[in-house]
Image (spheres, helix red, strand yellow):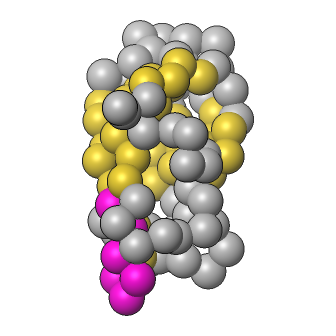
Amino acid sequence: KVNSTRITGTTTLDNTYHTVFCDSDGGAFTVTLPAGDNGRHYRIINCGSSGNVVTIAPNGAELLTGANASRTISDKSVIILEYETTEGWY
């Protein structure tokens, strides 16, 4: 079973999260990815409608879409990430 969770503030994901609905209407916040585990995946949705971004941050020195840097997603945007040991989060 895939777990769906709604969050409204800064959160560090773990293995209890799968699909994450980020309600950013109360303000921008950060979702931090955990240490990578080959094959782990997340679907992260900014379901807000107030113009606030959700920042996706990698764990430590891990790569997020090819760089050790955060990414942001705006209202009504979705990012699907899977971890691969050599490449990091894509």
**For the point 61% across and 49% down, which residue is it?**
14
Residue 6: x %, y % from top left: 53, 19
- Residue most toward the bottom? 86
State whether residue 16 is above or below residue 9.
Answer: below
Q: Quadrant of residue 29?
A: top right
Query: In terms of depth relative to the viewer, which is nearer, 10 or 28?
Result: 10
Q: State yes or no: residue 84 in magenta.
A: yes
Residue 76: x %, y % from top left: 31, 22
Residue 64: x %, y % from top left: 43, 68
Compared across the picture, whether 48 is left or right of 61 comes to left
Residue 44: x %, y % from top left: 40, 37
**For the point 35% across and 40% down, which residue is it?**
43
- Residue most toward the front? 1
State whether residue 59 is above or below residue 17.
Answer: below
Q: Which residues are magenta?
A: 82-87
Compared across the picture, whether 24 is left or right of 76 comes to right
Q: Quadrant of residue 3?
A: top left
Query: In terms of depth relative to the viewer, which is nearer, 3 or 79?
Result: 3
**For the point 60% across and 46% down, which residue is it?**
13
**For the point 37% across and 54% down, which residue is it?**
41
Total numbered badges shown on the rendered structure? 0
State whether residue 79 is above or below residue 78.
Answer: below
Q: Quadrant of the N terminus?
A: top left
Asked whether the viewer can see residue 73, the reply is: no
Q: Quadrant of the C terminus?
A: bottom left
Asked whether the viewer can see residue 11, the reply is: yes
